[in-house]
Amino acid sequence: MALSQVLSASTYGIDAFTVKVETHIEQGLFAFTIVGLPDSSVKESRERVNAAIKNSGFKFPNKKITVNLAPADIKKEGSQFDLPIAIGILSATEQIQSDILDKFIILGELALDGTLRPIHGALPIAISAKNSGLKGVILPKENAKEAAIVSEIEVYPMGSLAEVVNFLNGEHQLLNPFKIDIDEIFNQESKYTIDFADVKGQENVKRALEIAAAGGHNVIMIGPPGSGKTMLAKRLPTILPPMTLEEALETTKIHSVAGLLPPNTALIATRPFRAPHHTISDSALVGGGTIPRPGEISLAHHGVLFLDELPEFNRNVLEVLRQPLEDKKVTISRTKMTVEYPANFMLVCAMNPCPCGNLGNPHQQCTCSPAQIQKYMGKISGPLLDRIDIHIEVPAVKYSELASKAIGETSAQIRERVIKAREIQLKRFRGRKNLFKNADMQTREIREFCKIDSDGEAILKNAITKLGLSARAYDKILKVARTIADLSGSESIKPEHLSEAIQYRSLDRNLWGIMT
């Protein structure tokens, strides 16, 4: 009999945990069994491991082989166990004689010829290795940059099973750990290819998006086709404050676990922009599956989730957004597991004012009946609309603006003002948990930081009475007014700040008001 143990890892949510790959080999009829709640991709590794060992020039034992993935009560999935299973078999048969197997996490998918293919979740696994006090990780070359972001561990990228065996047997003693310059990588990756200066006209919409970026507010844009709603939404990430290293690491972890991190990419340093098609299912939007995976709202974490043609989404899909918009996270529960994914994103929506798109257009006649308009607008529920802070009308662009050679403000200029406003908010909320921007304020903070004078109260009372807004909409107006005051450098909320904030709720009356 022979027994060996190799360390590997698997992901759970956006974090990782260590898996001990125990291999037992004994005399008997040939059998190759993997236990420890493996999924189908792990079970299929038997054939890959068998072929890879033989094609790499090593001997595969014709005996009874049992591989246990501990802890045995957690589901294991993914192809990263191919390499540690192969190493376990070679160690148990004394083709590897090494005293460092307990110092490294080993990962990698094996091709039939023994070469290594990239895996998912290298970054959270490297973080787990560091937290467990291990020396480092051995993994495919394509995942090296991603894992090397984690300091204080050694990363050894390998190209094949034979390379790994030679390293473990001490034949590559001069092999140096893979290193990268985090600051240089961060600076290289944090660049956008689009700019707000590309947008002609729409100054009022740019102003609304600047306010949204400064306070982290959700936005809905309503206007005829071709007015620039999508173009404006795509440029919103370019005026958001630059990502911190902590934000970039958390965002990269999510994309790594989802398998969406491009090969040889170290870090996602630009704010994500996710624009799912309106045929998306609710589980694809918020996350799910038999083994839960992050959805679009988590992939948009620290960035923008853009829902174009909002009324075309199924109503049940839109309704599942309500809780994540409040909680900034989503919890996915299954019979044997519960996974929590972060979902702190800015929601940006765009839609036409009616099915034909010409309602309110002075140059085109609307052909929709009141019943059609009511049905179209009724696809968006009041509770969801309440969670959107800023409503802005996007009119058709005039020819004179399109033909103008004048260049508007660049994203960098707008971002400067946004950063200054965010700095004011960070100073204001210092020492308060999970409170970084005005949109994060709850009732207690609104009462403390959004005080208004008697003139402001009169303006707000008049607007609330006329528009018939909800208590949540009342809070939204105060939050947006606080952001406008921050952008102007004012310590107090003045009547003009409230007036501008109220105008961003006027669509409640102009469009949804027709249904009341």
Image: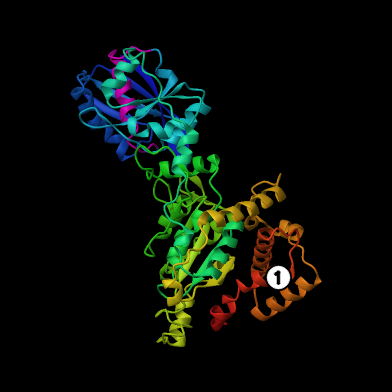
Q: What is the x, y in percent for residue 384? A: 54, 67
Residue placed most toward the observer, 19 or 505: 505
Q: Quadrant of the N terminus?
A: top left
Is 393 above or below relative to 256?
A: below
Residue found 21% across the figure and 18% down from its top: 59
Say if 204 sits above or below 491 in the image.
below
Q: Where residue 185 appears, x then y in whole percent?
A: 45, 37
Compared to residue 148, the image places residue 331 above or below, namely below
Q: Secondary structure at mark 1?
A: helix
The residue lying toward the viewer, choosing from 263 and 101, is 263
Query: Front-most of 334 and 319?
Result: 319
Relative side of 212 to 30, left or right: right
Q: Judge the density around disc 1: few (<14), some (14-19), many (≥20) Cα neighbours within 10 Å.
A: some
What residue is pinned by disc 1? 496
Residue 382 spot, x, y in % from top left: 56, 72
Is residue 92 something one can see in this rendering?
yes
Residue span colored magenta: 76-98
Q: Residue 477 falls in which quadrant of the image?
A: bottom right
Placement of the C terminus among the 4 image quadrants: bottom right
Residue 235 within the segment the image draws in magenta: no
| Residue 470 visible in the snapshot | no
Residue at image position (27%, 14%) is 95
Pinpoint residue 486: horizontal percent, then vertical percent. 68, 58
The front one of 275 and 81 is 275
Q: Amino acid at mark 1?
A: Glu
